[in-house]
Amino acid sequence: MSGVTERKAFTLVELLVVIAVIAVLMSILAPALQKVRRQGLSVVCRSNERQWGGFFGIFLNDNDGRFVGLELHKWIDVLRPYTEKCPDIYFCPLAKKTAAEGGSGAFAAWEEDGMKGSYGTNYWIRDKAYPYLPPDYPSDGWWKSFDVRGASNVPVLADCIFASGLPVHDDPPPDSRMPDCTYTEMQCMQYFCLDRHDGKINALFMELSVRPVGLKELWDLHWHKNWNPTNDPSPSWPDWIKKL
């Protein structure tokens, strides 16, 4: 019929060109989309820690402001009456699986006596001194209550590959971006020095605020009362931390 234009179909070559262009665009956009996803999950992680801050606040109010019974992984049992209706807050959304379940390195959750999580407490926060403290550790370094000077620089809970850690200022950084999750009572800063959130971890502080902390900044926080912030671990930074 006159006046009717026939529709020309795409040729195979044209279709292949379109597919190739889409593939190139996806390869360019994928890293950016992954980064946006990680940032979103990091926001969820900080939200979890804010909830932990609320529960710590209630716990402290019920115990005259003192950190009673917050030992190793037992802090989960101590706080369970407050948190039992919020099971999701035990895990950073980037670290929900233990090593046995396929989690690895900075993205592994821990498991201890049937308990699981991917956050750990600063073990220097407890009501009683630890009786088996190594002799070169400060015996009077314990934070026994939350009413302290400089509370905004004292970590309570953070991203961690174990339930608790006892950092000291001369702990070295981990050699690898992906730690092997081998437990040791010494060099506990390595439990927290995790590249879980693009060169940062999320942390809850003594005045119950939450913020991201760069891995190099971990040695500037006051983990115990006698912390030496003048210690400079930068000469021993492994290459993976130097690049952050």
Image (cartoon, rainbow, N blue to C red):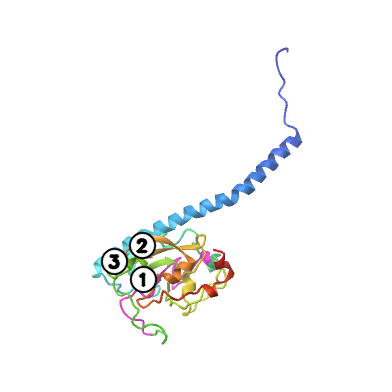
For mark 1, give the secondary structure: helix
Going 41% across and 64% down the picture, which residue do you hit? Answer: 203
For mark 3, give the secondary structure: helix
Q: Which residue is mark 3?
A: 59
Give the residues in magenta.
106-131
Q: Foreground: 86 or 34?
A: 34
Q: Is residue 34 left or right of residue 22?
A: left
* x, y percent for residue 236: 54, 75
Q: For the residues carrying marks 2 and 1, which lies nearer the camera in this image?
A: 2
Q: Quadrant of residue 75?
A: bottom left
* The stretch drawn in magenta includes residue 202: no
Crowding near the residue tagged with mark 3, few <14, some 14–19, many ≥20 C-alpha atoms within 10 Å: some
* x, y percent for residue 137: 40, 83
107, above or below 70, in the image: above
Q: Amino acid at mark 3?
A: Phe
Can residue 84 be seen in the rendering of this structure?
no
Q: Quadrant of residue 91?
A: bottom left
- State the residue lying farthest toward the front: 230
Q: Amino acid at mark 2?
A: Trp
Q: Which mark is residue 52?
A: 2
For mark 2, give the secondary structure: helix
Crowding near the residue tagged with mark 2, few <14, some 14–19, many ≥20 C-alpha atoms within 10 Å: many
Going 52% across and 51% down the picture, which residue do you hit? Answer: 36
Going 37% across and 75% down the picture, which residue do you hit? Answer: 224
Asked if the residue at tag 1 contacts the one at tag 2, i.e. Cβ–Cβ closer than 8 Å, the answer is no
Mark with earlier residue (1, 3): 3
Can residue 40 be seen in the rendering of this structure?
yes
Q: Amino acid at mark 1?
A: Trp
